[in-house]
Amino acid sequence: MKQPADAASQQHYEHDNAVLLQGLLVVDEQPVIEHDEELSSLGQELQRIDHKLNLVLELLSQTLRSWRNLPAPVPVRLTIDGVEWSSSQELPMDEPVLLKLYLSPVFPNPFVATGKVQSCRSNGEHTYAVFVRFDELGGQVQDVLEKVVFRQHRREIARARLRNSGGERIFS
């Protein structure tokens, strides 16, 4: 998109992005259940309710995905400042863009942000690594995005450690 979003659209994006990112954090949380004998029946009940809610959410998201024509998944590197991906199209520096990022199959709604192309370097035959820096994100969106990115980074570190240790895990 060549023209930047107007103020009303920007405000709408901020609200929707905050709701989306907070939803990702909530769904992604792992409940901490104490191993106290008194709490075990309560903990089991909470886990049962959590599993039911996750099932309902998954079924709802499958239904929503079937109604939408979502783009094919593409690997991206999301940071608190912007996003980088591999593109077959070269984009000019400082080109204003409107980004729609589908961050989770559970939530078939996009994270929408405006930004400008900061770099577009060749990766080889007709592919480019494009980095777009986000325009100013609202304070709440910025805070929640930082949490989402940090949590994802921690998970990547844990996965790397698991791969490097041979994949052995001890469950207790």
Image: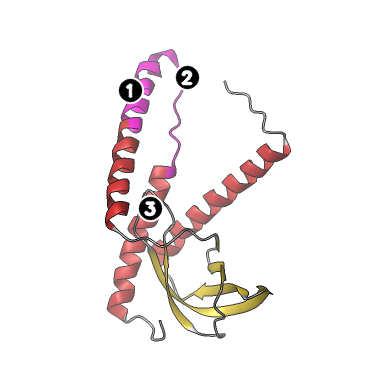
Residue bearing mark 3? 22
Q: Quadrant of the C terminus?
A: top right
Residue stretch in magenta = 28-51
Q: Residue 14's x, y, as percent?
A: 35, 67
Distance from the alpha carbon under mark 1 to that under mark 3: 25 Å
Residue 35 numbered mark, or none: 2
Callout 2 secondary element: loop
Nearest to the eye among marks 3 and 2: give it.
Answer: 3
Quadrant for residue 44, please give it: top left
- Disc 3 and disc 2 in contact, CB within 8 angstroms: no
Q: Residues within 10 Å of mark 3 (few under 14, many from 20)?
A: some
Q: Residues within 10 Å of mark 1 (few under 14, many from 20)?
A: few
The residue depicted at 43 percent of the width and 33 percent of the height is: 31
Residue bearing mark 1? 45
Q: Earlier in the sequence, mark 3 or mark 2?
A: 3
The amino acid pointed to by label 2 is: His
The amino acid pointed to by label 1 is: Glu
Callout 1 secondary element: helix
Q: Residue 48's x, y, as percent?
A: 34, 26
The residue depicted at 31 percent of the width and 29 percent of the height is: 49
Reply yes or no: does residue 42 show up in magenta: yes
Q: Residue 25's x, y, as percent?
A: 42, 48
Quadrant for residue 84, please give it: bottom right
Q: Quadrant of the N terminus?
A: bottom left
Image: 13 above or below 165: below
The amino acid pointed to by label 3 is: Gln
Distance from the alpha carbon under mark 2 to that under mark 1: 13 Å
- Disc 1 and disc 3 in contact, CB within 8 angstroms: no
Q: Earlier in the sequence, mark 2 or mark 1?
A: 2
- Disc 2 and disc 1 in contact, CB within 8 angstroms: no
